[in-house]
Amino acid sequence: MPLHHDRLGPEARSFLRNDLDMLIDGKWVPARSGKVFDTYDPGTGRVIARVAEGDAADVDLAVKAARRAFEEGPWSRMSPSDRGRAIWKLADLIEQNADEFAELEVLNNGKPLSIARNSDVAMSADMFRYMAGWATKISGETLSISTPGNYHCFTVREPIGVVGQIIPWNAPLVMLAWKVAPALAAGCTIVLKPAEQTPVTALRFGRLIEEAGIPAGVVNIVTGFGPTAGAAIAAHEGIDKVAFTGSSEIGRIIVKAAAGNLKKVSLELGGKSPAIVFPDADLSVAVPGVAQGIFANSGQVCTAGSRLFAHKRVFDRVVEGIAERAGSIRVGHGFSEGVQMGPVISPVQHDRVMDYIRQGQAAGASVAAGGTRIGNEGNFIAPTILTGTTPDMAVVREEIFGPVLCAMSFDDDDLDRIAKQANDSAFGLAGSVWTRDVSIAHKMVRRIRAGRIGVNTHGSTDAAIPTGGFKQSGWGREKGHEGLNLYTETKSVIMAL
Ligand code: ADP
């Protein structure tokens, strides 16, 4: 079978030379079953590597290793400062190998090289650095109680224990960083499962663990499929908490599987985020901002602004502006010079997105830009705008996870009614408001039921900013101090004096 590595530097090429094993208890091992699966370049559809296909047996070994590392140390006995230093080292190591990480991410995920290098890899390193700082700042409170003379009461925050982490394919290294960095800062041990579509950078990251001085068993990486390896993590009785990012559909399955031992669950799920453009908005900011909000990463972003609501007075100008940008976005293989948008992740995802576009048209929507596949090789879809969409259509209600914007107008000055339209969704992950009026901005921020709101921007992925959802978009917040708290338990201590 030909493995296509021609665009890679020598390091990345050498990494992919052999089949990729999993990291369990500090050792690189094949699956117990001996099985392997192919992983692909979504820009060509060609196989780029063979990866160990872990399942319940491998998850079990990984959980045992993580449990031992948690109970017996030295990780759990390490000083917070030493733990922080090791996490900081991971950031340095990611940066030292940034070109290789970026190339591997492009090859396996499809995104443009400059974005992988300057955004994904940089952001991942930054997340480790941010969380490294928190390792020394985890503390409880001294409590004022009603009988102060008789009792001394305080809280301590302790690591939650062994955590299972299941991540998606849209930003493989970033999603890893958002999960692994806070768990390490809190002192947890980890069984991580990357998405079956994109295991490569997670395994490359695994090579950094020992180099950073993190003991065996603290980070275990099991590659494999959702219904086997993923399900085994969600259900495992030896896991104290599972953190999941992916579709709301699988989120529900995770919650049910986790019910066995009532492990803690945090979920970052789907979205259908509104971008609301008021008539006074600076369109030279709003138009590129809304376009970026939906077309970045080929629309494969949970916080993507996939529903545009623009005031009737500016609707045509906004849609024309976004359509013009959509038409000029250079779509192509992530390694091609000047490319701004890559393919969607897989043929399955390609067909799903194209089905939505067809379905929207059949329901009465019109295509104002894109709407077509690009080329014969790889999973490329043109940046697409659907107009004439209505709130009852599946394209407006369901998460497409592709470069498809549903454009709608409003002709109203009543903010409650505008917000009601924007909030008419099962999801509540993000949203953006575009206006020059500070008062409208603040009022809309209060009215939108979502975990992250941008004003004259669709948002930011900074490590300090909590991200997560209202409603069916999830449980808990990742990143920021709240993201750290997902990995600690509060213990109250009551001392009778
Ligand atoms: P998508 O539909 O966008 O591929 P998913 O929600 O299916 O996203 O996948 C996100 C992650 O969840 C992946 O790592 C995948 O392997 C995992 N996963 C899929 N199905 C299950 C399952 N039944 N139990 C646990 N994890 C799963």
Image (cartoon, rainbow, N blue to C red):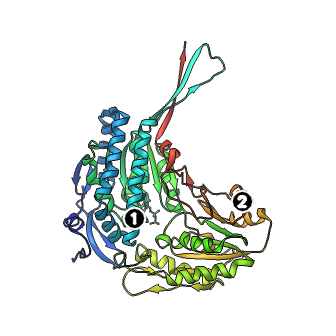
Q: Position of residue 78 (x, y in %)?
A: 33, 34
Q: Position of residue 89 (x, y in %)?
A: 31, 47
The reply to whether residue 191 is visible in this rendering is yes
- The residue under label 1 is 118
Residue plotted at (41% across, 87% down):
375
Q: Amino acid at mark 2?
A: Val
Q: Which mark is residue 70?
A: none
Mark 2: which secondary structure? helix
Question: N-terminal of the two: label 2 or label 1?
Answer: 1
Q: Amino acid at mark 1?
A: Asn
Ligand 1 contact, mark 2 (Cβ < 8 Å): no
Label 2 and label 1: CA atoms lie apart by: 32 Å
Q: Quadrant where the N terminus lies?
A: bottom left
**Closer to the camera, 54 or 395?**
395
- The residue under label 2 is 438
**Picture quadrant of residue 134:** top left
**Picture quadrant of residue 173:** bottom left
Please say if 312 is above or below 271: below
Q: Quadrant where the C terminus lies?
A: top right
Ligand 1 positioned in quadrant: bottom left
Q: Position of residue 57 (x, y in %)?
A: 30, 52
Residue plotted at (67% across, 57% down):
449
